[in-house]
Image: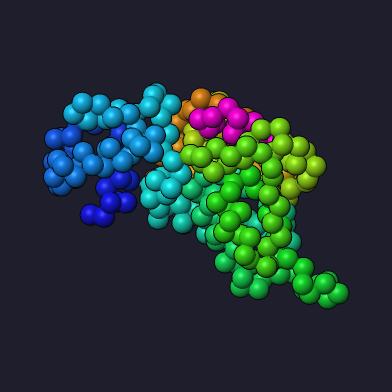
Amino acid sequence: MSKRERWNALLELLATEGRLEVEETAAALDVSSATIRRDLDELAEQQMLVRTRGGALAHGVSYELPLRYKSSRHASEKQRIAAAAVELVGDGDVVGFNGGTTTTEVARALALRAGGGRRDTSDATDVTAPVFTVVTNALNIAGELAVRPQVKLVVTGGVARPQTYELVGPLTAGVLNEVVLDVAVLGVDGLDPRLGVMTRQEDEASISRLFAERAQRVVVVADSSKMGRRAFARICGLDAVDVVVTDAAAPADAVTRLEDVGIKVIRV
């Protein structure tokens, strides 16, 4: 097991359990106690946990894994979700993306589609027109799309959140208030049939809400672990959502309740 794999496993365990004991964790990962102590010390230096005598604690109840360590969660499901989501986007559309591992996968799939040359050629006078225009507040998505000539990229300003790579604040809102989107693709931390779609941070929720308000269609991409889950900050109600793309493990009752309020649910 590489260091990255160990760190990912440690942070996953910490997010689930709230605390770790060196000896128990070493046995669970089948490595030495000395290796776990070194890993915990290094993670503490990066302020990703609180080191204690004999183990480690999460920073608090709202502990959130940095994006780079969440990417391996439900990876295959997210890739299938991404493949289905890009089929909801038409050539020439203006697409908004908030941050998150699932929206990142959708953005990658969209870039691959753009690179394949699919475009509306009815306007023969503008053969260099981009296949898509992408508006995002996610720095990692922007970094991947910036080198794609087939994609016109608009990045919002704002203050960067290091855990999710999202730009937030009034500068971000100022840009979004000046654009119009065909489709907003939103990643969320929770999707509740009564409360709507939610995320952990209120500043991210307000920006995601703006994405939804500026879009003609709202597509929520969420693996089954998010279905029926609640989070601290509400993005919007279900009345603002047109489509939910999730995986085949999504609970049937949750899917039915979404469909009952007129949301199209795609399970992949």
Report the front residue among 54 and 63. 54
Residue 174 sits above or below residue 75 on the image: above
Residue at 14 percent across and 40 percent down: it is 33
Q: How is the image coloured?
A: rainbow
Residue at 58 percent across and 27 percent down: it is 202
Q: Position of residue 127 (x, y in %)?
A: 78, 74
Quarter the N terminus occupies: bottom left
> In the image, 261: left or right of 249?
right
> In the image, 202: left or right of 36?
right
Q: Where is residue 95 in the image (x, y as percent from the top left)?
A: 68, 52
Q: Which residue lies furthest to the front in this view?
A: 45
- Whether residue 104 is visible: yes
- Give the main secondary structure, helix, strand or loop, of the magenta stretch: helix
- Whether residue 264 is visible: no
| Quarter holding residue 50 | top left
Q: Position of residue 253 (x, y in %)?
A: 44, 35
Does the magenta portion include 110?
A: no
Residue at 33 percent across and 35 percent down: it is 44
Residue at 49 percent across and 35 percent down: it is 189
| Quarter holding residue 250 | top left
Report the front residue among 10 and 110. 10
Report the front residue among 27 and 101. 27
Start-end of magenta stretch = 198-210
Please tell me how many numbered marks the rendered image carries: 0
Q: Where is residue 112 in the image (x, y as percent from the top left)?
A: 57, 66
